[in-house]
Image (spheres, helix red, strand yellow):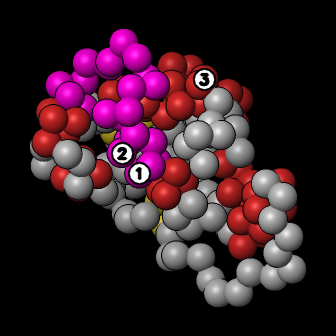
Amino acid sequence: MMAEMEASERAEIVAFWFFCGFSEADPQVAVLPDALRTLVCRGVEPADPGDSLLDPLVHSSLIEDLYGVTNAFLQQALTERGLIVEQIDGAPEPTYACPCCGYYSLGSEGGYEICAVCFWEDDGERDPEQVSGPNHQTLAAGRQNVLTLGACDLATVERVDRQARQRYRAPQS
């Protein structure tokens, strides 16, 4: 699948890893080869996103992108790639609702995970009027931004996954 990936898509995936500000303690980077983990934690994006040294980042992202997706989305994605699948059995992995947009896109609650739908970083703060440290705004402001911008803030509008609203279970009404 990596061989079929557009260069721009690969560059975006690689850039994401360096944008997030990972530290050595983050579980996402613990599984990476030592040299790559050091690069990611320093946050200095490499000049060539096509470098094979970065393949583990792309591979991890592709797997993570399927975590918690709905069966309908998975079936559609496989069909678009030429695989005919009549039915997908089983439930998606359990996911948690993003406190900002409400989509079930998070693997844990309060684990500083970034929502693919709105790019809110879930720090565990649930008071809508309390400023969220990593998001630099209140949850109420983030929610309003999702309604008007499609992302939690103007700076992340370009970073949100445009297919995320189809990937994940929608908010409960």
The part of the image, by quadrant, that contains residue 27 is bottom left
Pointers 2 and 1 in contact (CB under 8 A)? yes
Q: Earlier in the sequence, mark 3 or mark 1?
A: 3
* Horizontal and vertical percent position of residue 114: 43, 45
For residue 95, side relative to residue 166 (left or right): left
Which of 3 and 66 lies nearest the eye of the viewer?
Answer: 3
Is 126 inside the magenta-drawn segment?
no
Pointers 2 and 3 in contact (CB under 8 A)? no
Whether residue 94 is situated above or below residue 156 in the rendered picture: below
The label shown at residue 52 is: none
Say which residue label 2 marks: 56
Say which residue label 1 marks: 60
Say which residue label 3 marks: 8
**What type is the residue that disc 3 sits on?**
Ser
* Horizontal and vertical percent position of residue 115: 50, 47
From which residue to which does the magenta span run?
39-61
Q: Earlier in the sequence, mark 2 or mark 3?
A: 3
Q: Give the main secondary structure of the magenta stretch.
A: helix
Residue at the image point whose x is 81% and y is 82% from the top: 87
* Horizontal and vertical percent position of residue 60: 41, 51
Binning the other alpha carbons within 10 Å of mark 1 as few (below 14), some (14 to 19) or many (20 upward) gives some
The part of the image, by quadrant, that contains residue 21 is top left
Note whether residue 159 is visible. Answer: no
**What type is the residue that disc 2 sits on?**
Pro
